[in-house]
């Protein structure tokens, strides 16, 4: 751009003075170090399940308990990537974000070995983590939520439901538009329901935001408020059937609300064509190892 401007200015001066054009200067190439973009490309793990144009956000963050504050903010035009955390550095990224958000709220950070039956999804903006959610799969050892709510979850099992849990949610505040948050939940739902065949999900949340999860995602309380010693904070157990989530997505995802009506989070889920692509990629990455 600067070279083009220089040529135009030179031409105007020559027209005024009648001077001959100056000989063209040989083009010089600057040597540049690796750019941020190239570094981000080098960081790609090949585990992407959803990919679109990059977002540009400041690094301001919050824990899941503040998700309702996102609903009052406008949607930011942009996109993001969601990847399956399979490599050590991806798990470190997710843990670092969870640790930052939990400690920022005065919560304890659950530590210990990585659970083998926990699959973590991470949202990235050009190599920078902006959100994460884990899906815990039920087994003979149970779920993390069984520590506080074994009887409540056993009632679901006894009714013939296959139960998983959504856990360790943490999202970058600026990047956590409704679309980012909905994309993480939608991906977790597709993996748990369509890939693994589970029928219900449970999640432990701060009591202040039970209403948010009910209104926006169809989660309802099934356990009383208790102190979660893993994070040193109060919790309530919520549950949602994947049938109700599927119905919400089929009704709203990718569509425009009627004038004057409020957008629930389902509106920001993947539309059908994107959902098919995400599901196909999940099957390739998780099932077709």
Image (spheres, rainbow, N blue to C red):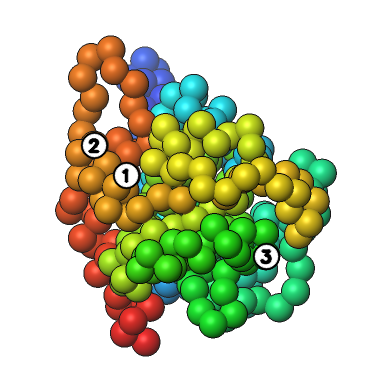
Pointer 3: what residue? 147
Q: Is residue 190 left or right of residue 65?
A: left
Q: Quadrant of residue 19?
A: top left
> Height in image: 5 above or below 149?
above
| Residue at the left extreme, as displayed | 273
Look at the numbered disc 3 and give the secondary structure of its residue.
helix
Q: CA distance from mark 3 to mark 2?
A: 35 Å
Q: Is residue 106 visible?
A: yes
Label 3 vs 2, first from the N-terminus = 3
Residue at the image point whose x is 42% and y is 74% from the top: 46
Look at the numbered disc 1 and give the secondary structure of its residue.
loop
Residue at the image point whose x is 76% and y is 59% from the top: 230
Q: Is label 2 in contact with label 1 (beta carbons under 8 Å)?
A: yes
Pointer 2: what residue? 252
Mark 2 crowdedness (10 Å alpha carbons): few <14, some 14-19, many ≥20: some
Pointer 1: what residue? 269
Mark 1 crowdedness (10 Å alpha carbons): few <14, some 14-19, many ≥20: many
């Amino acid at each position: 751009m600067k070279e083009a401007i220089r040529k135009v200015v030179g031409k105007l001066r020559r027209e005024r003075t009648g001077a001959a054009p100056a000989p063209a200067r040989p083009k010089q190439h600057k040597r540049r170090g690796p750019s941020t973009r190239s570094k981000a490309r080098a960081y790609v793990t090949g585990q992407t399940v959803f990919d679109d144009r990059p977002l540009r956000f400041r690094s301001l963050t919050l824990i899941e308990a503040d998700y309702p504050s996102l609903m009052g903010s406008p949607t930011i035009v942009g996109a993001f990537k969601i990847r399956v955390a399979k490599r050590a550095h991806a798990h470190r990224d997710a843990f670092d974000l969870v640790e930052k958000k939990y400690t920022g709220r005065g919560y304890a950070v659950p530590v210990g070995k990585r659970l083998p039956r926990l699959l973590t999804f991470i949202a990235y903006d050009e190599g920078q983590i902006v959100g994460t959610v884990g899906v815990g799969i039920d087994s003979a050892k149970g779920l993390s939520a069984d520590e506080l709510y074994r009887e409540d979850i056993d009632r679901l099992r006894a009714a013939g439901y296959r139960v998983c849990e959504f856990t360790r949610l943490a999202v970058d505040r600026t990047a956590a538009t409704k679309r980012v948050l909905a994309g993480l939940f939608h991906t977790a739902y597709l993996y748990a329901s369509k890939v693994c065949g589970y029928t219900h999900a449970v999640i432990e949340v701060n009591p202040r935001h039970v209403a948010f999860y009910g209104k926006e995602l169809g989660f309802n309380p099934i356990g009383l408020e208790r102190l979660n010693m893993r994070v040193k904070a109060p919790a309530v157990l919520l549950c949602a059937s994947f049938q109700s989530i599927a119905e919400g997505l089929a009704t709203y995802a990718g569509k425009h609300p009627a004038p004057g009506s409020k957008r629930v989070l389902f509106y920001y889920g993947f539309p059908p064509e994107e959902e098919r692509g995400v599901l196909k990629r999940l099957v390739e990455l998780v099932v077709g190892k």
